[in-house]
Amino acid sequence: MKKRFLFLMCVIFFAIFVMSACEAKPGPVGATGADGPEGKSAYQAYKEKYNYEGTEQEWLQDLINGELSTLPEHLVTFDPNNGELAFTQSIKDGEKAKRPSLPIRDGYTFQGWMYDDGIAEEIWNFGGGSITEDITLIAKWDYATYELPIININTDDAEIDSKENYTDMTFSLENCESEFFDLSGGIRLRGNSTSKYGKKPYRIKFDSKQPLFGLKKAKSWVLLAEYLDPSALHNYTAFSLASQMPGLGFTPTPYKVNVYLNGVYAGLYTLCEQVQENEGRMDIELDEITEDMVDLKDFNFFIAMDWSVTEDPTAILDETYFYLEEYDQYFELKYPEKSQFVSQQQFDSFWAQLKAYVKEMMQAFENPDVEANKEKIQNEVNLNSLVDYLIIDQIMGEQDHAWKSFNMYYTNTSSDQENGKLNFGPIWDYDWCLYTPWTGSPNEDYTVSDEIAYSNIFFTAVADVPEFYEMVKERYTLYASPALEAYLEQFDEIASSVTESVAINAAKWYTSFDPDLSQDNIDFLKEYLENRKAVLDDAWLVATD
């Protein structure tokens, strides 16, 4: 009897409640078909008014148990603004929203939940702000670090999945002295083996020439991903040292940058010039190729000894590269392109002469102690460039140049030591070096090597000919040893300038490795360079007046 009385009282109470809350005429109380506003059931009316999330059966049970609220409820929507789905809280009128757990976004620092009331944006105060209506709070983010320049690339979420075709983009460079905003152009993948890793290397081509970081204006620039180098300083070190070697006509200028792609942190990169024929870079570009150019040395040309060209789907045998079976080496023609020649006949003649010339030079370097070959090298090669290239590779412990990324060029339009000679350089590709064994994954070997090894036939020839080897000692003493000493004096400052960025990059790309991987590689690089200087000083340093 008592239970029936309590149930009847609940039903009577709710009938009064429904009439006031839903402004409905009384009907069969508790019946889900009772008319509410616009013919809605009591359940439907209550659900809409109070943002009730339960089923009709749950609603009836809550009604019986006296657990239904008479206060309106409001939805607070939280947009984490990090690619994840929004979520909501149902808050009673006049009460405070609950502070959710902190969202996460790679490469950014969370600033708070922003509220826009139509007049101004402000960070929501969870301790003081009461909820009186449905609102949306959006996560506000800032860059995780401002220690380096920041590059923002926007493709409107279009994929960058080709090494041939550029994806339209806008490009901004900020947090540096020479800022640029919304430059138009294209971006594509670059590299061979490096493009297979999750962290992608890119080539950028602006619609018009741009002087990034105050460098010579150009359309094409490169973003090196350097996934295999957790220190992120191998290329930076090699390029910095090579810039002090006057025999190398052009060396890319490296800048460490943090890159964001469509608002997503892409990682720590090295931005530098594209190695190409261009004013301010390799100044070998011809005004035009004319039909009276018939001999090989009427042209300027840029080639690379590079086995990885065979992995390039755009490469064409005997059109963009050739193979010398006697030396098991591939050579890629980087400039000029076939389309620049006046005719197929002219290109065919150039190509045949180029292959013969490279083979002839290889034969000379293969037996440099033969007097005729030694004289040929002395007369036709810019030995300063070759010796300086060798020295940089020995400092860096570079081994890939035995078969790839080994550049050389010929020019007859230069007014300096390069003119009419085969030049070696520009240097390139130091992601994997320091004489560490190849693993195909980021370096975890910290064994310092004392080895002095010559990776290719050109370097071996220099080491085998006493006159050439004396040049190594002289140029190391005059240029390389002082440059390396100066770099080591600055090393801690250089490493400190990328500390935050290296850690953020590691948190994105090296999650399956030791958390100290990047810092360990930085420490190893310093130890390696200090030891390397001692080894090479002992081998090559000569007394000077």
Image (tube, helix red, strand yellow):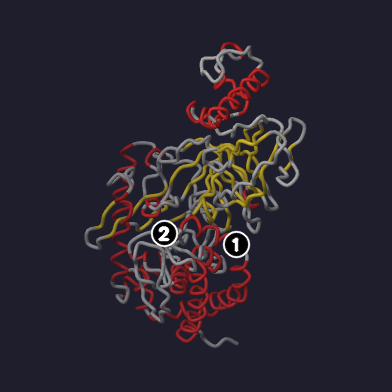
Q: Amino acid at mark 2?
A: Met
Q: Residue at x 57, y 11 (%)?
A: 39
Residue positioned 71% across, 42% down in the render: 124
Q: Is residue 109 above or below residue 72?
A: below
From the viewer's perspective, tell me whether residue 422 is left or right of residue 87: left
| Marks 1 and 2, the one that precedes in the sequence | 2
Which image quarter is the C terminus in? Answer: bottom right
Tag 1 residue: 500
534 or 243, nearer to the observer: 534
Residue at the disc numbered 2: 408
* 368 lies above or below 224: below
The spot of residue 514 in percent (x, y) is 45, 67
Q: Is residue 422 visible?
A: no
- Mark 2 surroundings: few (<14), some (14-19) or many (≥20) residues within 10 A: some
Above or below for 225 versus 28: below
Name the mark nearer the viewer: 1 or 2: 1
Q: Position of residue 423 (x, y in %)?
A: 44, 61
